[in-house]
Image (cartoon, rainbow, N blue to C red):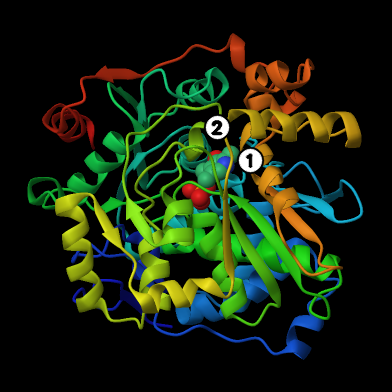
Amino acid sequence: MKYVSTRGSAPPLDFTGVSLAGLASDGGLYLPQHWPQFSHEEIAEMRGLSYADLAARVMQPFVGEGLTPERLRELTHKAYSRFSHAAVTPLTQLDERQWLLELFHGPTLAFKDVALQLLGLLFEEFLSREDQGLTIVGATSGDTGSAAIDAVAGLDRVEIFMIHPKGRVSDVQRRQMTTVRAPNVHNIAIEGSFDDAQAMVKRIFADDAVTAKHRIGAVNSINWARLMAQVVYYFAASLQLGGPERKLAFSVPTGNFGDVFAGHVAARMGLPIERLIVATNVNDILHRALSEGDYSTGVVVPTAAPSMDIQVSSNFERLLFDVGGRDGAVLAEQLRGFDETRGMRLTNAQREGVAGLFASTRADQDDMACAMRWASEKCGEMIDPHTAIGLHAARAADLPDGVPVVTLATAHPAKFPDAVERATGLQPVLPARVGDLFARDEAFKELPGSYDAVRDYIMEHAA
Ligand SMILES: *Cc1c(COP(=O)(O)O)cnc(C)c1O
């Protein structure tokens, strides 16, 4: 399998290359040159596989020659052995139509573990083959950072610098990053928003002074292997709820558009999906883009769902490329315009391309709290603020009769105890496996929101 850039001019890479790469050299994001297809019969035959075996089956076409099928299976079994539920991503039924897909049974209690536990193993595998090291630089609004740090802490060939916006991640999220004491882990807190942190990471990738000395890798969802691993749970949910004979809808709490893009990939591969509902909070650029064609940034409003407090959604570029004719040169031009004015209109082709599969809903503070209360009072389920935004959208969706709606439960409620308690009056309890989080010492470097300060720190501390 070959991977091409959304901006058309970076050289194609194979799976190994794309796993270790960050942004493509032309500033774009890598995507498979074509979508592998599974027939109806092939999908039906996946029924009954364990999660780890299903993962190997769904990902093999993307991995291609990168790993033998046996080695891939070994890695998926190892990656998912650290999950606290045997089904890895179990479903919970809320009412006749509404389901939750629980993606938070990994070590750091958010869906990002599903992809990052595997990515850490892929890094180790490919780097030792090439006898090389990798310096990961990432930006996080909370969950990526903790999941990435957990996945790579203690690895010999990988070093990680994780930048978070100071004061804008929850205490649990911050502690999950800053209490990991491994020599290859560096936490940085900057003054500013997540978008500021993300913009810095993009500059690091393009900074010749840095890349001349270090091989820089990505763990944000600009990394293709992450999205690939997330495609698997769409198949897992479908197979459990009657797929491929029955179509499902998915409601996805969305920030950087990685998780829901994985749903688009599943549909492209042949999984019958009725609708992908993009759920946003009041930071609603994606809702405006999908419903009105208006992709223009506003000011980030901090909310109780910080992983969705995003204005520029990196992976939206992948969707625009894929539905808009896959012309990298034309997309690069459109995005240059966006970079200058911080806004753009989707083309007619792009709007038509998203219209069939995608819908979107924006939830404000009250919608979110209502969804948390409904889940708690009517269904006896505590859900986190991100999941609540997804559930709000799922309940508001206009769908044909008989189509189940699966909301992706992206974080454990105990990651956001204050918001859950405000909405429901109940205090979620941290699972025992992370129980001593508040007793451990923290370590992180505070820096001003200046690119030079962050780059200098990384250059000084990278091995
Ligand atoms: C990262 C995250 C999201 C957003 O996912 P994207 O792939 O960036 O769209 C939603 N909810 C939670 C809890 C997250 O950690």
Q: 50 or 249, which is in the foreground?
A: 249
Residue 196 placement: quadrant: top left
Quadrant for the N terminus, please.
bottom left
Q: What residue would you read off at disc 1?
A: 389
- Tally the numbered discs: 2
* Horizontal side of residue 111 vs 212, given as left or right: right
Q: 261 or 36, which is in the foreground?
A: 261
Hey, what amino acid is under mark 1?
Ile
Q: Nearer the viewer, mark 2 or mark 1?
A: 1
Other residues around mark 2 within 10 Å, as few (<14) / some (14–19) / many (≥20)? many
Q: Is residue 100 above or below residue 8?
A: above
* The residue positioned farthest toward the left in the image shown: 209
Are the residues tagged 2 and 1 within 8 Å (C-beta)? yes
Q: What residue would you read off at disc 2?
A: 305
- The residue depicted at 53 percent of the width and 49 percent of the height is 254
Residue 338 visible in the displayed image = yes
Check mark 2 vs ligand 1: CB closer than 8 Å? yes or no: yes
* Horizontal side of residue 23 vs 329, given as left or right: right
Hey, what amino acid is under mark 2?
Ala
* Horizontal side of residue 325 vs 461, given as left or right: right
- The residue depicted at 36 percent of the width and 54 percent of the height is 314
Residue 120 visible in the displayed image = no
